[in-house]
Amino acid sequence: MNDLIEKWPYIAPWSEEPYAPDNLVWRESHLAYSDETPEDRSRGVLWLRHTSARGRGVARPAKIHLGRQREVMSTLSCQVCGKDTGREAAELWDGARLFLAGQNRLLADGELAATPPVHRNCAVRSLSEGSGCTHMRGTPVLALVKNPVQWGVHGLVHNSTQVPIGRRSIAYGDPALPYTLGLQAVVELHGCTPFTTEDLKAAA
């Protein structure tokens, strides 16, 4: 089972990890769960509940497990193996972390990203033909990022009557944050250096 789990990215959900039942309520001008616990909220954000049963069922590598995405983004850990990227960043790229996204994405200064960083070898593995990460085929986008700043959340914003009005990226401290159900943690990229798959192969 461990070999099967390790084949797939840490942030990939599995078929037996459904979203938890929706029991949202409105309390004192903010969204809440009727049975809310401290784990449901961080930095003022109420997060969509996503059950955790990694390795059970079928892996879905083209999708994101919301809880694990938030976990690795908050610590800037690797989206593939779930381990810290700081040591590799210091040893290889003067503190810059490697970010990898699917084609047609933009990784540049001032851009927002919900894609966590990745280790060099984990990136190579994800882009290999047998990885199963078919959503990364084609022309993936890579960058070395010196300063990824914890910026906010991509989530489902509600109006004052608890009606969803759309998905948006909301900064921490934004007045809309109490009305937002968080889906993914977002960082703002600074100190970006373009990177290519050829650079990646040369560094491996």
Image: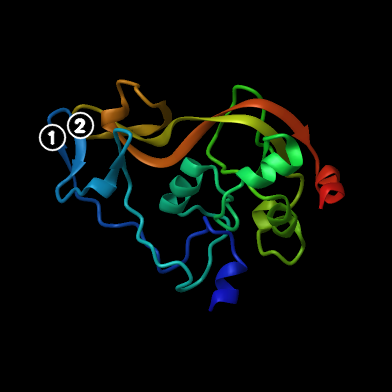
In the displayed structure, does residue 29 sit left or right of residue 134? left
At 74% from the left and 29% from the top, the residue drawn is: 193
At 65% from the left and 36% from the top, the residue drawn is: 105
> Which residue is nearer to you in this view: 136 or 147?
147
At 57% from the left and 49% from the top, the residue drawn is: 84
Q: To which residue does mark 2 refer?
A: 30
Do callouts 2 and 1 mark residues in contact (Cβ within 8 Å)?
Answer: yes
**Secondary structure under badge 1?**
strand
Disc ID at residue 51? none
In the depicted structure, whether residue 147 falls above or below residue 117: above
At 87% from the left and 48% from the top, the residue drawn is: 202
Q: To which residue does mark 1 refer?
A: 27
In the displayed structure, does residue 148 sit left or right of residue 137? left
Q: Of all residues shown, which one is farthest toward the bottom?
A: 1
- Structure colour scheme: rainbow
Mark 2, other Cα within 10 Å: few <14 / some 14–19 / many ≥20: some
Mark 1, other Cα within 10 Å: few <14 / some 14–19 / many ≥20: few
Identity, as a three-letter code, of the amino acid under mark 1 = Arg
Identity, as a three-letter code, of the amino acid under mark 2 = His
CA–CA distance in space, label 2 to label 1: 5 Å
Report whether residue 124 is seen.
yes
In the depicted structure, whether residue 127 falls above or below residue 182: below
Report whether residue 103 is seen.
no
> Which residue is nearer to you in this view: 190 or 175?
190
> Which residue is nearer to you in this view: 151 or 156?
151
**Secondary structure under badge 2?**
strand
Q: Point out residue 53 in the picture as x, y percentages from the top left corner.
A: 40, 67
